[in-house]
Image (tube, helix red, strand yellow):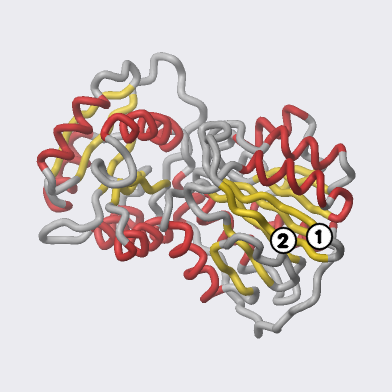
Amino acid sequence: MIKIGALTAKKIIKVLIVDDSAVVRSVLSKQLNNVRDIKVVGTAPDPYIARDKIISLSPDVITLDVEMPRMDGITFLKKLMKHHPLPVIVISSLTPHGGDMAIEALDAGAIDVMCKPGQAYTVGDLGIDLVQKIRAAACAKISRIVARPDENKSVRLSMTRTTDKIFAIGASTGGVEALTQVLTRMPANTPGTVVVQHMPMKFTASFAQRLNGICAMEVKEAQHNDSVIPGRVLIAPGGKHMIFRRSGARYMVHIKDGPPVHHQKPSVEVLFHSVAQYAGTNAVGVILTGMGADGAEGLLEMRQNGARTIAQDEKSSVVFGMPKEAITLGAAEKIVSLSDIAKTMLNLA
């Protein structure tokens, strides 16, 4: 398994591009080869050719299409993670079907997903975002993605009352696996939970649907004015910010557009600041694995307003960026391994 620490300034990240489209291979290669710390060492039109190039070229990161000839990307990903685990970024089309497949790829061990050129991204936007994701992937602890949690699903209870306790969770790179581990360990009457996971539009709906099938709680992609109630998890929709609000005894979320914060939309920072303002001492905030600093200042504000706060520890994080920034600011009351976060949240509540 690969467990790499922070890259040095001289480290060149070797990338293998796997995609059946010659245009996509050419565009990505040209863009990535213009970045001084990234080198495209090879391309492959299908998984069989990719398999041979992985052995001969030893790439640090792979970009992978989902729908390809001879073998689909998800099947290849599962085989790769079983026999030769490497950081993989899935680049998929943004159709509802593609969104479902991208979520399945994350579940199989991909470290991140992106949209293909010509869909939600322009070619230029894709290159800028991809560079950051490749750098994060090259530092990732792949063994942490491959492991699957024990999932003991409880009987779901119907909950309709409001709650005085709120869980607010933020995550990015590696967060799909981390959130799955945390949420599947929560009982059906868990306090109302709001989540920001950095993820493109339409993927969040598929992610919520998958979690809904394996969690004791109801899990759904948040809609404007959705109530935050016990037994429900609301996941911020990709491409929109989610803001926590209170009206009398009722907690709810507002979904809004706006500029990215910390280059992210949805932003953990936006959610945490609103939870600090409207929930205060009634909240428990958690920041999980991810690249960058999104959410660190918001978690600090939550703690300053009386909330209990948790950061995932370095050893269990796929990328120790967001938790590290929160810890450095003094925002985290507790620093906890991923396997203990659910229990710690429930104890604090």
In front of the other: 189 or 310: 189
Q: Quadrant of residue 290?
A: top right
Q: Position of residue 222 (x, y in %)?
A: 58, 61
Secondary structure found at label 1: strand
Q: Quadrant of the C terminus?
A: bottom right
Q: What residue appears at the point 66 percent right and 41 percent down from the top-left corner?
A: 270
Q: Quadrant of residue 2?
A: top left
Q: Residues within 10 Å of mark 1 (few under 14, many from 20)?
A: few
- In the displayed structure, would residue 209 be above or below residue 127? below
CA separation in Å, label 1 and label 2 = 8 Å
In the picture provided, is 278 more to the left or to the right than 115? right
Secondary structure found at label 2: strand
Q: Position of residue 115 (x, y in %)?
A: 32, 46
In the picture provided, is 126 more to the left or to the right than 274? left
Q: Which residue is mark 1?
A: 247
Q: Position of residue 176 (x, y in %)?
A: 51, 55
Q: Amino acid at mark 2?
A: Met
- In the displayed structure, would residue 182 be above or below residue 240? below
Q: Quadrant of residue 232?
A: bottom right
Q: Earlier in the sequence, mark 1 or mark 2?
A: 1
Label annotation for residue 252 = 2
Q: Position of residue 259 (x, y in %)?
A: 53, 35
Q: Amino acid at mark 1?
A: Ser
In the picture provided, is 71 more to the left or to the right than 172? left
